[in-house]
Amino acid sequence: MKGDFLKAMQFRHACKIFDAEKKIPDEDLRFILEAGRLSPSSFGLEQWRFIVVRTQELKEKLKEACFNQVQLSTCSDAVVIAAKIEELLPGSEYVEARFACLADRPEVLKWVRDFYASYYSGINISQWSITQCHIAAANMMTAAAAIGIDSCPIGGFSLSKVMEALGLDEVKHTVALIVPFGYRVNPQPQKYRLAFDDLVEYR
Ligand SMILES: Cc1cc2nc3c(=O)[nH]c(=O)nc-3n(C[C@H](O)[C@H](O)[C@H](O)COP(=O)(O)O)c2cc1C
């Protein structure tokens, strides 16, 4: 188990070009998306929305919006992770529905509502929403790696161009990350990471 998990972590790398001829089976794509769906989120608000881009036409538009990064045009499927904004407003129908799942007693519900309203007023909501989406992205990439599928997190994009290509409304959403999935063409480069002891301290 531990070995399998670490193998997946080592297998995952920021793949720079995919085999454009190889398509991910629907069942495997579903498995990847499920890992995103089951991810943890602050206040259980599931701040993400997953837009799966499959047509070549839209992939080419995304490529252009991502400074011509070829991962977008060669991948099998690109998952654009849109971060919710408007729905996260305290008291919104969306928030109320999520909190109803979290809190089973009226006093707990009131506490969560009040705490959320105060928390919300002190943060940058769009940035906060994006951080939640990154957790889902990481889980999807690890899930993909576990079944031999490559990915690349793409944060290098023109926000306005991606929003336009997908017809997203800036009041409702921003774009957190784009994650193309597919199969590598080139061998994986060496992985560079800081040494364990330079990162981890026990107190
Ligand atoms: C939020 C985020 C945005 C990134 N954006 C890009 C990108 O636009 N293009 C790209 O090729 N790699 C991108 N990367 C990949 C990193 O460059 C890569 O993960 C890092 O260099 C470590 O290499 P590895 O993932 O292959 O181990 C991004 C990674 C993260 C986490």
Image (spheres, rainbow, N blue to C red):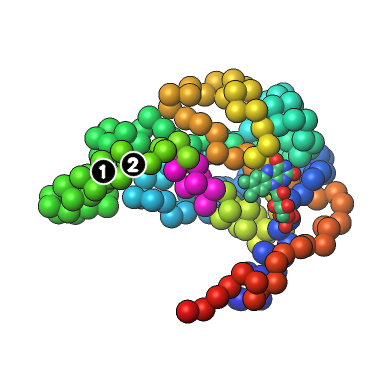
Mark 2 residue crowding within 10 angstroms, few (<14) / some (14–19) / many (20+):
few
Q: Is residue 199 visible?
A: yes
Q: Position of residue 66 (x, y in %)?
A: 71, 31
Seen at 27% across and 36% down, the residue is 90
Determine the image quadrant of residue 97. Answer: top left
Task: Give the label on residue 149, or none.
Answer: none
Q: Which residue is mark 2?
A: 122
| Residue 43 horizontal/vertical position (percent) | 34, 50
In the rendered structure, the answer to whether residue 106 lies left or right of residue 195 reads left
Q: Which residue is mark 1?
A: 118
Q: On screen, 139 above or below 178? A: below
Q: Which secondary structure class fits the magenta region best?
A: helix
Tag 1–tag 2 contact (CB < 8 Å) = yes
Please provide percent x and percent y for residue 200. 58, 73
Three-letter amino acid code at disc 1?
A: Ser
For the residue pair 110 and 180, the one nearer the viewer reads as 110
Residue neighbourhood size for the residue with mark 1, other residues' Cα within 10 Å, grouped as few (<14), some (14–19), many (≥20) = few
Q: Is residue 177 magenta?
A: no
Q: Is residue 27 visible?
A: no
Q: Which residue sits at x=28%, y=33%? A: 92
Image quadrant in which the N terminus is located:
bottom right
Asked whether residue 134 is drawn in magenta, I would say: yes
Q: Nearer the viewer, residue 150 or 200?
A: 200
The reply, left or right, for residue 29 in relation to residue 10 is left
Identify the residue at image location x=65%, y=28%: 158
